[in-house]
Image (cartoon, grey):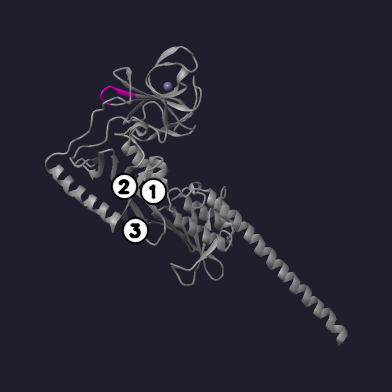
Amino acid sequence: MQLNLKPVFLSICVIFGLFIFISNTLKLELKIKSDILTNKVNDKNFKDNDKNLNINIQKEINQNNNIIEFKRDLPDKKLNQISIIVKKDQTFSEILDNFNLINKRKYQLINAISEHFDLRDLKVNQKIIFFIDKNEELKEIIIEIDFKTNLKIILNSQIKIEKKELKTYSIIESKEYLIKDSLYADGVKSNLPNKIIIKLIQLFSFDLDFQRDIKKDTEVSVSYEITNVENKSQYSYGDINYARITIKNNTLEYFKFTTDDGFIDYFNREGKNVKKSILKTPLDGAKVSSNFGMRKHPILGFNKMHKGIDFAAPKGTPVYAGGNGVIEIAGNNGAYGKYIRIRHTNDYKTAYAHLSGFRKGISKGVRVNQGDIIGYVGSTGRSTGPHLHYEIIYQGKQINPLTLKLPSGKILQGDELKRFQRKYKMIFAEHLNNLFE
Ligand SMILES: [Zn+2]
């Protein structure tokens, strides 16, 4: 008896040891995977999403590889919910390999979805939710197409697909800060979303020369829309509703208003449109490196009229259309390098030189709106380093953009003015209420 017990005891020990070893290896592997994934998530930008979402997703991923089990919002109590975060270079077909699907069914499914949504548009870090029954059979998939639209795929004998618009609601957020360093840097420090800071810069750029006008302790105050989606942590930023900047004793105010002709625009308290026909600075955060006027040419060496403004900025910085208009030239233009010229109304044109490239779709005859990205800062043509050479041309002659007095826009009158006055008082009251509640 004693002799027979020994091998049994030994086998139990071996099996137990093996179990411990396998489970530890598995844990370790999962941990490594989750670390890699966490890093990936950190690297990838959730630009339009907030920090909370980022944290939520990380937490979910950390729980168990990139597959996470959810307990909320089960459409059917019998189904288990599994969320998968799309990794870089991962195809939908590869994701489906996590589930027991025969090839025929898999391709049937991919074909059915492709009729409604191009699966190549899946983004890194996008979440796809799968529902399986207790036999691990895939019953339902939810793909979040954009922040407020879901594609729901139901897998029965037939595959049924429905597009679902989710309910959204908007709130207004308000912030106020002093500029110590720059409008941009202090905006970031005050937790202003990137997208809103860029809109703020574009709005102010109609009236301000950032280098000359903005001094230390300039006060900025802003209200903007946040659109939330019901039952989701995700949201997007909308328009600026109100903005104010106080320089010395001069206060500039901007109120969002939809005019009678249906355009969304910005007006001051007097009902004067603050938008100008052409931007003085068609890029963000740039420094003027060479002004309009006579100068010793950095490459040619002799004195030459500089018929534009040079803005020093890193290669790849987006360049905006200075005004609404039509692209007249987009191509190589000798010493100007890669060059764009836009024709605006009232005999105005703007030109952009030394670009590293053009935005996709920008070519002769294309219509652009003020603030649209048209190209990227570079150093092509006769250039000593990355910068934008910007010209404003009036009746065929280059003029100095910084001293240019541009025609101002619409002035509200009559009933439209009265409607605006009611609106701006509401916007302002909400702004103050948000700031000081
Ligand atoms: Zn220049």
Label 2 residue near ligand 1, CB within 8 Å: no
Percent position of residue 325, x then y: 32, 29
Give the position of the C terminus as an image quadrant: bottom left
Tag 2: amino acid: Val
Distance between the Cα atoms at labels 1 and 3?
25 Å
Residue 9 percent across, percent down from the top left:
80, 80
Q: Quadrant of the N terminus?
A: bottom right
Q: Residue at x 83, y 83 (%)?
A: 5
**Amino acid, disc 3:** Lys
Q: Residue 222, which numbered label?
A: 2
> Which sits earlier in the primary sequence, circle 1 or circle 2?
1
Residue at the image position 68 percent from the left and 68 percent from the top: 23
Question: Residue 395 placed where, x, y %?
Answer: 28, 18
- Ligand 1 within 8 Å of the CB at mark 1: no
**Farthest-out residue, right:** 3
Q: Of circles 1 and 3, which is in front?
A: 1
- Marks 1 and 2 in Cβ contact (< 8 Å): yes
Residues drawn in magenta: 345-349
* Secondary structure found at label 2: strand
Q: Which residue is mark 3?
A: 167
Give the residue pinned by disc 1: 192
Report how far apart the C-alphas of labels 3 and 2 lie in the structure.
26 Å
